[in-house]
Structures are given as C-alpha cells and as structure tokens.
Image (spheres, rainbow, N blue to C red):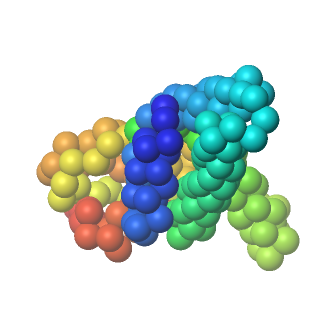
Amino acid sequence: MNYRELYENWKKEKESENLQPTSVNFYIDLSQHIQNLIKYEKEQEDRTVKSELIKTELQITKQLTSDLFELRFKKMLYSIINNIPISVDILANDEKIIYRDLLNSLKDFNKIRGEVLEGPESTKKEEKKILVRLLQAIPAIIGADMETYGPFKKEEITALPNENAEALIKRGIAVKVTI
C-alpha cells in the first residue's frame, strides 16, 4: 500500500454511489503504510525538507483514511437499511465482520419492533422466501436471514428471503417466478 493506492481507492469511493471493491487485506496494508510513515517521521532529523514531506503525507494519509472509513461505513449502512444486498466479495475482511454484525443488529431491531407492535408470537413465524430468476450473474450475498446465498449465474432460479428478493426485483436484477 502507498499513498497513490489509498488516494485512488478514496477517489473511486467518493465518486460512486455504490460500495467499491477493495482487497481483503486493505485495512491491514493501510495500517502498515501508516505505521511505516510514523517510523520514517521519527527517524528524520527535525525540520528537514524530507521530514516535513513525511509529516504532511502522514497527515493527509490519516485524513483520507478516516474519510474512506466513513464513506464505506455509510454505504454499508445505507445498503442494509434499504435491503440492498452487498456482495461479500467486495469487502475487506474487517468489513465482513462489521457487515455481519450490522445485519444481526437490524434483525434484532426488527424482531423487537415486531414483538412490541404485534406481540411475541409475530416474530416466531418462519421467514418467507420468494422464488426469483436472476437476470444477470451476481456474486454471493448475505441474506436478511444471515445465510449466504450464491454466487448465482444469469438465468438461475433460487429462493431468497423476501427482503433480498424484493430489493433485487426493484433494482431490475431479478424477476419473481410464479408457479
């Protein structure tokens, strides 16, 4: 990882509405880059041109990193709240854990809300699934029921949790199959 790679990742994320793919070790590599900059900064003599350049690069790197974290987290939240599936293939390993935990939190929230509004028996019914035909190939997704579905090929037919199926249908990625 270097400054240019970080900047390119940040720029792609900033310019796109959708979460952009990143390497599985992205945050590990980024952390290592920041630690190297800190080390180089400490090794430099005070007030040299090189030390000032390293100090500036470290400051900008931290700002870009913070902004990138926030951008990606907000996009994950938006997708979860709006039932838009995210392919786990585009997430860094650390993000996969966050994504799973956010999905679990939303599931718990919906369960509690359902119990308050409809009574405890309302949340005990089985999650309804919808049969859909995929209009394009899609990578694996984590369903609203926390199960992994896919990857899927174009024209493949599968049963997905209601929330996920409706989101794919709404986005024109799938159509409902009626028997």
Q: Quadrant of residue 73?
A: bottom right
Is residue 137 among the parts visible in the rendering?
A: yes
Point 41% across, 50% down: residue: 8
Point 40% across, 58% down: residue: 12
Point 35% across, 63% down: residue: 168
Q: Quadrant of residue 96?
A: top right
**Looking at the picture, does residue 43 appear above or below residue 117?**
above
Side (left or right) of 148 relative to 104: left
Q: In the rendering, at what x and y percent does residue 13 appear?
A: 45, 59
Q: Quick one: 144 or 77, which is closer to the camera? A: 77
Q: In the rendering, at what x and y percent does residue 160 appear?
A: 40, 52
Is residue 91 among the parts visible in the rendering?
A: no
Q: Quadrant of residue 5?
A: top left
Q: Quadrant of the C terminus?
A: bottom left
**Looking at the picture, does residue 98 appear above or below residue 11?**
above
Point 72% across, 28% down: residue: 44
Count of labels shown? 0
Q: Residue furthest left?
A: 155
Q: In the rendering, at what x and y percent does residue 41 appear?
A: 72, 32
Q: Residue furthest front?
A: 48
Side (left or right) of 151 relative to 54: left
Q: In the rendering, at what x and y percent does residue 30 appear?
A: 58, 35
Q: Quick one: 61 or 48, which is closer to the camera? A: 48
Q: Quick one: 115 or 48, which is closer to the camera? A: 48
